[in-house]
Amino acid sequence: MRCHEAFLAALEEVESIAQHSNDLLASRERHSQNVGNAISRSGLVLLCGHFEGFIRELALEAIDRINQLELDPRDLPENLIAVAMEQAVQASGAKRQRDVANLTGALRDGRAASLDRKRLSGPKGNPSVENIEKIFSAFGLDSVIDQLSIADFGVQSTFVDELQSQKVREKLRAEVVSDAGGVVEHLCEIVDTIWTPRIRRREVGYVSAVQELLKKRNRIAHGEGREIVTPTELLVHVDQLRKLGQGLVNLMAELIADIGEHQGANSELGDVVYLPY
C-alpha cells in the first residue's frame, strides 16, 4: 500500500537521524554532544508524527480501496456501515439530510455507496492504543494491538481480568477487627459474585511500545524536564513501529482482499498483499 511505502521511507529518515546523533555523541566536544542529544530527542518526536500520519493515511487508503469495489453496502463489515451512519447523523443541516438519505437509499436498493474517507479516518491526535483500535474497529477489526502483540511478543493477551474485590480487600482488612475464619476473603468472594471483573490492559507487547513512545514524545514536546533518548533507544522504537506498521497493513490488506474475494468483485487493487515479517 502506498502509505506503507511512505512510512518505511520515513523510518529510514529517523534511522539516519539516530546515526547522526550517535556520531555527534561520540565526540568529546560538549557542544557536539548537546546537539547529538537534541537531535535524538527531535527524532523521537518526528517518529511519532510519522506514525500518526501513517495510521491516518492507512485508514484513508483503505476507504478509497473499499469504495473502488463498488459493493452493496450490506456486504461491507457491519461496523463500517454503523460508523458511516453515525458520522452521517452527526452532520448538520442539508449535509446531514443528504448523507443519511444516500446511505439509507443504498442499503434499501442494494447500490454502491461512497464512504466518506475523511470522516471515517478516525479520531485526530496522538496514535494511542485506544485511537488505533478505534480506527480499526470501524473496519470490523477488533483488538488489533492485542492480536499483533500475541503474534509478535508471544504474550497470551494484553488484557487481564481484575477482580472488583482487589479494590476493597486491603480496606476490609484494615477495618475488620478479627479475620478469624477468613471473614475478609468471604466478603471479597461476595463482592466478586455481585460485580463482574474489570478488564484492564497490561503494559506488554505493543501496548507498552506505543505508550512508552507517547510518554517520551509528550515530555519532550511539552518541555517536561530533559528527556534522554539515546540513539539506541530511538532505533528500538523505529524497529517496533516498523513491525507494528507491517502488522496493521497486513490486517487491513487481508480484510480488503477478503471483502473483494467474497463478493467476487474485480477490485484491481494490485499492491494489496499480505506480507510476512
Image (cartoon, grey):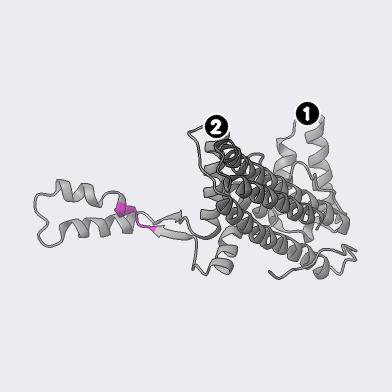
Q: Nearer the viewer, residue 86 or 255?
A: 255
Q: Nearer the viewer, residue 277 or 94?
A: 277
Q: Name above or below for residue 157 compared with residue 89.
A: below
Residue 263 lies, in percent from the top left, at 83, 67
Which amino acid does the dot numbered 2 rest on?
Answer: His
Graded by Cα atoms within 10 Å as few (under 14), some (14 to 19) or many (20 or more), the crowding at tag 1 reads few
Q: Is residue 263 left or right of residue 128?
A: right
Residue 243 lies, in percent from the top left, at 65, 61
Q: Is residue 166 left or right of residue 133?
A: left
Label disc, if present, on residue 93 of the rendered structure: 1
- Residue at 77%, 42% (x, y): give it: 118
- Residue at 57%, 39% (x, y): give it: 29
Label disc, if present, on residue 179 of the rendered structure: none
| Secondary structure type for disc 2 | loop
| Secondary structure type for disc 1 | helix
Which one is in front in this view, the residue at disc 1 or the one at disc 2?
A: 2
Residue 174 lies, in percent from the top left, at 16, 47
Helix, strand or loop: magenta stretch: helix
Residue under numbered circle 2: 222
Q: Is residue 261 magenta?
A: no
